[in-house]
Amino acid sequence: MTTQKKPFLEILIIYIVIGFGGYLSYTFISFSSELLRFFVADLVMTVVAFLFSLYKKNSSVYDAYWSVIPFYFIMPWFVNTHESWAAAHYITGFTVSFWSWRLTHNWYRSWHGWRHEDWRYINFRKQFGKYFQPINFLAIHLYPTLIVFLSMGSLFYLFDGSSKDLNVLVGIANLISLTGVLIELFADNTLYKSRFNKNEADRKCIRKGIWGYTRNPNYLGEMLFWIGLSLVGFGVTAPIWTTLGAVGMVLMFLFASIPMKEKRLLVTRTDFIQYKADVPMLIPKLKRK
């Protein structure tokens, strides 16, 4: 077995174990609330992922979890309730699945084995020293799990086993989410290809394609995806709390993810100050410079 294939086989086995832990938790939990059963299973899988991150001494074990879990939830909904599925269920199920597999594929092609760990986690290790492991569990593992689960709240009211008609709001909501996924697709493809152009990728900001209109197209697309899912909830009369996850996502990207990324670009890209002056942070300009 080649040195490149072995890490991928290991991470595949790890996620099979994670998924099996979630399946056992969901199956043997006696709560009557479907929402609570999914939540506990999600927490169990997060703990298993954390334990593997300790074993591998690499917190990037968790990186694929963000994108895998929504699709993992879609599967039991389909198995248990597909007889009542209508257009609203299939369209939303496709949107979530498309987002999930696209993002997972992007992780797969960008992951370079156990020698790779997200630069943010490396910074946390240096910053917090002996206190890193509590940060590792709470900030790197638990918080993303909670925010994604909360952001999927509307789906529990769509895939509740009852028939749902495809109305205008559900259609528009899915269109917003799919637009976000396509923005991410174009942005990540351009970013991936730029890595093979060392002169451009190593020291200068990308200005090709959508990167010439917005500095953070991947984060813009991610926000649109989760906002769209929250609007699905309005289309199926879900309670107002199901919008809290999308709000949390937007705040996280605006006040944590984007500032951290741009602070790093200021150091790693020689033209970032000019790029920042030319290209807006999120909302694209109609005319690029």
Image (cartoon, rainbow, N blue to C red):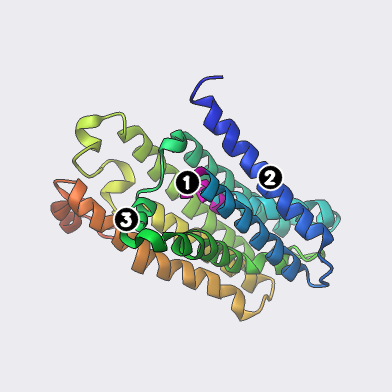
Vertical position of residue 160 compared to residue 265: above or below: below
Which numbered disc flags the more N-terminal residue, 2 or 1?
A: 2
Q: Is residue 59 magenta?
A: yes
Q: Amino acid at mark 1?
A: Lys
Name the side, left or right, on which 30 lies relative to 37.
right
Q: Amino acid at mark 2?
A: Val
Q: Is residue 90 visible?
A: no
Residue 127 quadrant? bottom left
Which numbered disc flags the more N-terminal residue, 1 or 3?
A: 1
* Discs 2/1, front: 1
**Neighbour class for label 1 at 10 Å: few (<14), some, many (≥20)?**
few
The disc at residue 126 is 3
Q: CA distance from mark 1 to mark 3?
A: 14 Å
Residue occupying the point 77% across, 59% down: 26
Secondary structure type for disc 1: loop
Q: Which span of residues is magenta-colored?
A: 56-66
Residue occupying the point 54% across, 75% down: 244
Q: Residue 94 appears at what percent x and percent y?
A: 65, 49
Q: CA distance from mark 2 to mark 1?
A: 18 Å
Q: Which residue is mark 1?
A: 57
Vertical position of residue 279 compared to residue 169: above or below: above
Secondary structure type for disc 2: helix
Q: Are marks 1 and 3 in contact (CB under 8 Å)?
A: no
Q: Nearer the viewer, residue 4 or 89?
A: 4
Q: Which residue is mark 2?
A: 17
Vertical position of residue 116 compared to residue 220: above or below: above
